[in-house]
Amino acid sequence: MTSRAGIIALTIMSAIFLAGAGIAWAISSETPEGSTVHEPGYVGDAAASEGIPAEIGVVAESTDYASALDEAAAIRAAEGHAPSNVIDGALADASRVSARLVRYTSTHEPSGVSDEGKPLRELPCWMVVFHGVMMHGHGGGYVDEAMRDDEPEAYPADLVVFLDADSGEYVRMMAYPSAASTH
Amino acid sequence: MTPSNWFVRLALATCVILAQPCAVAQAAPWFAGGWNTPNGTGPGARVVGTEVKIDSDNPSVRDSSSAWNMIQKQGTGTAYMQVGWAKDSPSWSYPRYFTEVNLYDAPGYHYTIWHGTAGSGSHLYKITDDSIRYYLLIDGVTVRNVQKSDLAWSPNMVTFMGETHNDYDQFPGRATAKCRFLDGAYKRPDGTWWKVYYYNVSDHYGISTAGNSSSSFTVHDGRYW
């Protein structure tokens, strides 16, 4: 009798343990491959502090990774990647420029790699953000010439450049309207 | 007239002459390529995807130009979704793949991502969908997804274009090395894919050979051999 009660108790405890472990696994959200799964809209502490919207597909989390570049060098390098649709001189007029070391994950390119072949998953990077930069849309929707404005309307945007923390090489770049972070 | 007056007049004349191309350069962007709407599919016709192969054509790309595949809302220059390649800066050694999507149907709400360096040769740029999202793919690999609920506009036009922003830029391709668009198709909401028959767009210095109902066409910059 005692042993039967013990078995029942052990079975219940095992069931509780297994259920708990399952719930814990689901919450900790480690996939079998070891990558982390986040709630929709999660962008990481570093991206959140810069107001980067989830739609642009960035997860950036702060790190104390030892980079081969210092902050000033990272900003200079990022400036060299600025696209031509940034109005001339607008980078210098940015309302704020920040550079911080992050672990960068692309949620849009889960299987993506940098030009150097490094997976875009928790990749140590410099994240340089130029806030409030006047730029045009990169492209445009086609409309007949008669319906076209002579000059595309410029708008304030945030330009984000990710550079490999080891090599300083370009990884990815994105831009979105400055107002997007409050959309 | 004293030499100093001559100098002033010459300087003013030089400024006026130099100002002309600058004024012209403001009339941008320009396009060359082909477009199509799903005519014959009835009122409210929509497209939900498209694909086309495009040459990267790096040797002919100078300061700033791009070539892309797009679905858009006809008649508006702001509601669109693009996937293609762009060389957006003279400091870039090679073009980069890019995607740009207008969200919330708000002018200026462009969300642009410059992806990795574009490889030489021809690449397949594709947009497709499921019930919840659009997917943008390059050579079969998804590089971006967009929630349909974030889009707030409905595409009804397919556009394959090269683009440049001003006289100092260059359309993709040159007369002796044209940029080719091949095997264009669009996707209807029922999931079927249809071959695209193009309407031609040749704009400014950009020359297109679209409009011949063939399976390919080219674009190039008429200023360069």
Image (cartoon, rainbow, N blue to C red):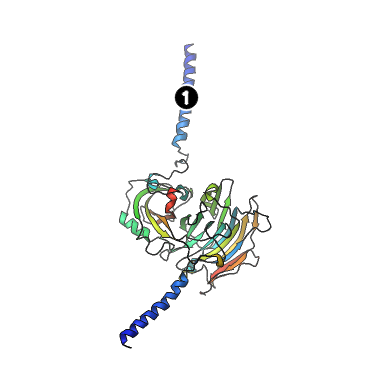
Front-lying residue, B190 or B138: B190
The percent position of residue B80, horizontal first and vertical second, equals 54, 56
A55 is higher (above) or lower (below) than B84: above
Left or right: where B203 falls relative to B116: right
Residue B35, picture quadrant: bottom right
Identified at 56% across, 54% down, the residue is: B127
The percent position of residue B174, horizontal first and vertical second, equals 52, 71
B28 is higher (above) or lower (below) than A156: below
Left or right: where A21 falls relative to A70: right
Left or right: where B194 falls relative to A139: right
Viewer can see residue B34:
yes
Identified at 61% across, 60% down, the residue is: B184
Q: Amino acid at mark 1?
A: Ile
Q: Residue furthest bottom?
A: B1
Q: Chain of mark 1?
A: A
Q: Residue furthest front?
A: B1
Viewer can see residue B177:
no
Front-lying residue, A67 or B104: B104
Count of numbered circles on the image:
1
The percent position of residue B209, horizontal first and vertical second, equals 60, 69
User: Is disc 1 placed on a helix, strand or loop?
Assistant: helix
Residue receiving disc 1: A16
Q: Residues within 10 Å of mark 1 (few under 14, many from 20)?
A: few
Residue B79, picture quadrant: bottom right
Identified at 36% across, 82% down, the residue is: B9
Front-lying residue, B180 or B99: B99
Left or right: where B21 falls relative to B156: left
The percent position of residue A161, horizontal first and vertical second, equals 40, 55
